[in-house]
Image (spheres, rainbow, N blue to C red):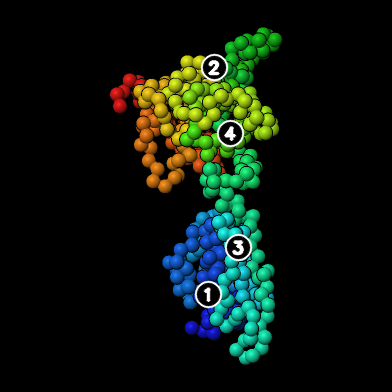
Amino acid sequence: MSDNRRAGLYLGPDGTPYQGGKLLHNLLLFGRVCKGLGMDVTPSRMIDVAHALELIDLGRKQDVYHTLRALIVTRQRDLPLFDEAFRTFWRRPSEGWTTLNLQSLGETRRQKKTQFLPPPEASPEGEQEDGSPKPAVDPLMILAVPTFSQQEVLRHKDFADMTGEEIAQARRLMARLRWGLGLRKTRRFVPGKGTLLDPRRAFRRNMRFAGEPLEFLTRTPKIKPRRLVLLCDISGSMERYTRLLLHFMHTLANSIYQVESFVFSTRLTRITRPIRHRSIDVTLRQVSTTVKDWGGGTRIGDAMHEFNYRWARRVLGDGAVVLLITDGWDRGDPALLQREIARLQRNCYRLIWLNPLIDAPQYEPLTRGAQALLPFVDDFLPVRNLANLESLARELQRVDWRRPERPAHAHLIVR
């Protein structure tokens, strides 16, 4: 191996490596930085990186950069993180050893600043091998920019584990998402370029100009936004997620054209009016006084029965999409739940079940409520963190949305 390859990978402005470090030691440090930033870095991948660096000229900074990026970065969203880490890490250190604040890289469980041991040729204090004094440690050797890493960690953090400050930040990120259900064709028609003749307008227009060539006017279906209906479980089993889910409902109510909001535990409560208030604090205060069964037991079947026979005809018209937010734990009659959820699916355009437990390790929908719900939902999606909400926003905005194919008389099929 050449002298450059035995030297550390500290590259100067001219692209030449500085002497004094250990390649493997610095490479492992850089791998830990990338791992802390949320990249998928494994020991085997770092071994491949070390082998690949033997095949290139380390004096060419761009070759080193592209080699590391090709082997370490596996997702497009990690490219800005990698560029920042590479630019900050692979530069000449002003002193002899390195400090790295892993807390700023997203590892919130660490409370102290972690210091990595220097290469064998250097130590923070004492004397060097030739007897000269060692320089002091420079804490600014590695500057980690926490903006990307904190947001990345927050995107994948469970709603149940968030602190008050993280909830406020999650709400700001949630408000930036683009929510929409697309457009739908109504039964009404408006003047426009289409294939259908508008005889009334054509007759009136041609009566004004007797003897002139006839003018054929056309019409097109009127386009309107699709309606959204929210049914959120606020029982005791959902207590850890209730606060963030109410923030989620408040964001949707103030972002989409027409939203109807309901919460349920042992009974169903309509909160459409308070959830539309601009202030989230006022909304939470009004909802807390309106809902009487907060954190109680779960009777999904009874709540769906009340919704179907009291509210469905009012709010499910015009091809409404229903978001059912629950963990599937139910203390009621499974047969009643199965009948009512089948009725709800028939009356809506699309029924989406959002479950905060889907991404949990070893979760399986084996409860009686989940077994009754699953055959009659069109989509079964997680709602555990911000990344799930981003996926949901993209799903709801799909232009080519079509009503799912459902078997005829599905409610009569014995399951």
Q: Give 58 or 323, whichever is nearer the viewer.
A: 323
Mark 2: amino acid: Arg
Residue at label 4? 246
Crowding near the residue tagged with mark 4, few <14, some 14–19, many ≥20 C-alpha atoms within 10 Å: some
User: Is residue 381 at least partly visible in the picture?
Assistant: yes
In the rendered image, the vertical position of residue 202 relative to residue 129, given as above or below: above
Residue at label 3? 112
Mark 4: amino acid: Leu
- For mark 1, give the secondary structure: helix
Crowding near the residue tagged with mark 2, few <14, some 14–19, many ≥20 C-alpha atoms within 10 Å: few
Residue at label 1? 25
Compare marks 3 and 4 and give the one earlier in the sequence. 3
Residue at label 2? 314
Q: Residue furthest left?
A: 414
Mark 3: amino acid: Lys
Q: Residue furthest bottom?
A: 130
Crowding near the residue tagged with mark 3, few <14, some 14–19, many ≥20 C-alpha atoms within 10 Å: few
Location of residue 91 in the rendering, given as x and y in whole percent from the top left corner = 64, 72
> Which quadrant holds the C terminus?
top left
